[in-house]
Each structure stands twice: as C-alpha cells, then as structure tokens.
Image: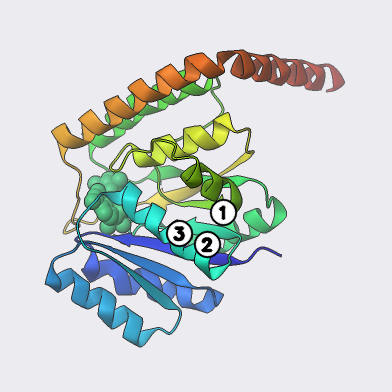
C-alpha cells in the first residue's frame, strides 16, 4: 500500500487554497502546504487552513523562490513524514480536483510509476499559453527521444518519493520556476521510471491570479531545455536503445493483432 501526501505550493494563491484543501481532507493524508515567501495576506490563508484542518502541514519559506523550490521543500517534508508517494496539485484551483481519487488509484496500481496528467482545456485557456505549450512539448520529444508524453508542463502528478529523493540528493539541476515541471519529468524519464498518463480538466477563472511572467518564465524554460539538450546528448545511446526497443515492441504488437 502506498502512503500518500499532497503537496500544494502557494504563491499569491491564498484565496483559492481553502477550496483545494477542503477537497483533499477526505483522503486522510497529510496535505503539505508550502508558503513560497508570500505576503502577509496570503500567509494568513495558510495559517487559517492549518488551524482549520488537522491534516495540513505548513512549510514556510522565507523568500519567494519559485514553484520548483517550493515543491522540493514539500518533498523534503514528505520524506520526513515517511510517505512513499506525493500528489502535487496547484493552489490556484485550476485543476479538476475530482480526478484526485483516480490518480491515487493509478498510483496504487503502478507504484513505481510517475502518474502524469495531461490537460483538457476549455475555452477559457489563453491562446498564447496553448501555443507555448505546443513548443515546449515538441522540445520534450527531442530531449527524451520519444513522442509518448502528452504534456510536459502540468503540475497535477503523483511522484513516487524514492526516485525524487535520490534526484534531490544527487544535486541534479532543477529549474526553480516554470521550467521545473519539465525538468523533473525529463529526469524521471531519463531514469527509466514508467510514466502513466491520464487527463485532467483545466480551467482559467476570469478573476484568477497567474504568476506567469512572459519574459522571465520563457527564459527559464529555454535555459532548462538548453541544459536538458546537453544532458540528452550524454544519454543518447541509452535513449536510442530504448527507442528501438519501443519500436520493436510496437511491431510485435502489430503482428499479433
Ligand atoms: N508561478 C509561480 N508559482 C508558484 C511560485 N511559488 C509557488 N507557486 C505555486 O505553483 C503553482 C503553479 O503556479 P501558477 O502561477 O498557477 O502557474 P501555472 O499554473 O503554470 O500558470 P497559469 O497557466 O498562468 O496558471 C501554484 O500553486 C502557485 O501558487 C512562484 O514563485 N511562481
Ligand atoms: Mg495555474
């Protein structure tokens, strides 16, 4: 049996935190809420959640460091708590929380795997964000030499803790901001961790707060992919070998059918 915790990083999303946490309480798992150096107003929402729900474990970061640093601090806390798997969910309430149960079940069935969501957008999604995502996903195919992963940037995922912890201990360079979700996914794939994918609906509420900064975050994503391209070159023999194996498996399946 997996032992789960949730990790909810928070930056300027205090107002939507209660909605997210209140839907997670029924799973009877620790909900690690990471304050990423918020202003007092948002810190107060986190304090309030910790008082209201006994499952909330707050983690306080002095300064804002970016989603990557916040999630990694959440993983350190999860390790202290002795859990085996963490489900990371954003605090802005954009992810369809009704999918949590299904993702936990997928993780129970595939304990070694990273359970990775891919977004199903409605008409509220900004067109520029969708285009940027397509570009980022193309680069994912390049640095993994595979076209099997549908999305590289979504936050809604269940990570097995052991490989995540090893990655942190190995001091692998992981982006602190918007490149983080890409970086961590690619490192898991390079390590040969199986990835199970399932969709999650994403909505952009009209009054929603986005921390996305076009220049800063695109620079972070570009730098992350530059590093990953270099990493891919060193790993290319293994990645090519895996790609050939995958191709052969597909051919065998085609013959059997
Ligand atoms: N962007 C960002 N998010 C942070 C930071 N620290 C913690 N977070 C949390 O990380 C999650 C993702 O942040 P969002 O700003 O929603 O990023 P996103 O969902 O990729 O971008 P949008 O498509 O604009 O919503 C949220 O729960 C944030 O509160 C930070 O410094 N920057
Ligand atoms: Mg968001």
Disc 3 to disc 1, C-alpha distance = 10 Å
Q: What crowding class fits label 3: few (fewer than 14 Cα within 10 Å), some (14-19), or many (20 or more)?
A: some
Q: Earlier in the sequence, mark 3 or mark 1?
A: 3
Nearer to the camera, 238 or 107: 238
Asked if one can make out residue 204 in the rendered structure from this viewpoint, the answer is no
Q: Which residue is mark 3?
A: 76
Residue visible at 17% across and 35% down?
A: 216
Where is residue 164? Give x, y as percent.
Answer: 53, 47
Q: Residue furthest right?
A: 256
Q: Which mark is residue 79?
A: 2
Residue visible at 67% across and 15% down?
A: 241
Disc 2 to disc 3, C-alpha distance = 5 Å
* Secondary structure at numbered mark 3: helix
Asked where in the image residue 154 lies, by quadrant, the reply is: top left
Q: Which residue is mark 1?
A: 161
> Which quarter shows the N terminus?
bottom right
């Amino acid at each position: 049996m997996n032992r789960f915790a949730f990790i909810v990083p928070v930056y300027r999303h205090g107002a939507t935190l209660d909605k997210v946490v209140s839907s997670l309480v029924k799973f009877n798992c620790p909900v690690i809420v990471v304050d990423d150096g918020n202003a007092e107003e948002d810190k107060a929402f986190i304090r309030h959640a910790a008082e209201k729900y006994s499952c909330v474990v707050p983690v306080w970061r002095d300064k804002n460091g970016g989603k990557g640093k916040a999630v990694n601090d959440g993983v350190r806390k999860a390790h202290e708590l002795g859990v085996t798997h963490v489900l990371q969910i954003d605090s802005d309430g954009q992810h369809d929380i009704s999918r949590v149960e299904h993702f936990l079940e997928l993780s129970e069935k595939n304990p070694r795997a990273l359970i990775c969501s891919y977004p199903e957008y409605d008409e509220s999604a900004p067109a520029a964000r969708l285009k940027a995502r397509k570009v980022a996903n193309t680069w994912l195919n390049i640095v993994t030499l595979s076209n099997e992963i549908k999305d590289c940037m979504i936050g809604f995922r269940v990570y097995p803790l052991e490989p995540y912890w090893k990655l942190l201990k190995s001091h692998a360079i992981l982006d602190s901001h918007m490149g983080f979700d890409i970086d961590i996914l690619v490192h898991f794939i390079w390590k040969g961790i199986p990835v199970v994918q399932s969709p999650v609906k994403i909505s952009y509420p009209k009054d929603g707060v986005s921390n996305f900064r076009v220049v800063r975050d695109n620079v972070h994503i570009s730098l992350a992919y530059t590093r990953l391209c270099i990493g891919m070159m060193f790993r290319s023999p293994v990645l090519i070998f895996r790609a050939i194996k995958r191709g052969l498996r597909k051919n065998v399946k085609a013959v059997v059918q």
